Image (tube, helix red, strand yellow):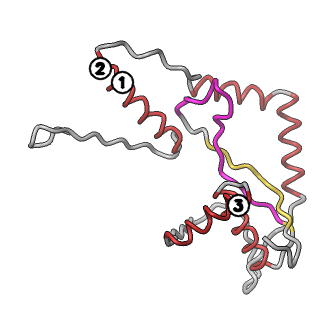
Amino acid sequence: YALPDGGAVAALSASHIIADAGTRNIVMAEIELLLDHAQAGTAPPPPRSVPFNEYALAERDFLASPRGAALIAYWRRWNAAQPVMQAPRTGIPLQWAPGRRQLHNLLLPRRVLERVQRLAHRLGATPFLVFLTLYVVTLSRWSGLARFPVRILGDKRTVLEVAETVGLMFCADAADVAVPQGADF
């Protein structure tokens, strides 16, 4: 957008149906790269990524193969074997299903974030792992379950060939959590 003072503003909007946060970062880095080369008067290097459509077709082919069928069967068995967490007061099963999504954002005070960072450093872990541990310990205490599954959002850009692929490359990895009663952090 051209601004009255002669400046400009660009807006980037992407639907989470077709793009993830990693895509936003890749596109922003690409814009900066193109601007740097435009200012230097040089040609930018060619893109280094696999196009998303190629990635998606390869994933589809894999899932249609015998190895893919075995993987699908494994995860179906794993999922069927998981306990169903229930809300303690109402007994309502907490399962992923179609319905109205509820989002509860919260703002963590800086002092809490700093404590998490210090704890992560002391434990040789990442802040993400500290938050994940806090989350599962809280769920265990709340539900009374010592074992249950959680889904952890991740990024499928795990190899160099797809590191700069633009598209919906997030995943929800299932993890089996064990939190024995009385276990410490």
To which residue does mark 2 refer? 38
Q: Position of residue 118 (x, y in %)?
A: 63, 63
Q: Which numbered disc flags the more N-terminal residue, 3 or 2?
A: 2
- Label 2 secondary element: helix
Quarter of the image that includes the N terminus: top left
* Label pair 3/1, CB-CB below 8 angstroms: no
Left/right placement of residue 129 relative to residue 12 reads right
- Residue at x-position 34% and y-position 24%: 36
For mark 1, does the 10 Å Cα neighbourhood hold few (<14), some (14 to 19), or many (20 or more) residues? some
10 Å neighbourhood of mark 3: few (<14), some, or many (≥20)?
A: few
Residue named by callout 1: 34
Magenta stretch, residue numbers = 148-166
Count of numbered badges drawn on the protein:
3
- Residue topped by disc 3: 122
The residue type indicated by label 2 comes to: Ala
Question: As drawn, is 142 to the left or to the right of 165?
Answer: right
Q: Is residue 44 above or below residue 173?
A: above
Classify residue 184 as left or right of residue 5. Answer: right
Determine the secondary structure under disc 1: helix
Measured along the vertical axis of the image, is residue 133 above or below residue 16?
below
Residue 150 belongs to the span the image colors magenta: yes
Pointers 3 and 2 in contact (C-beta within 8 Å): no
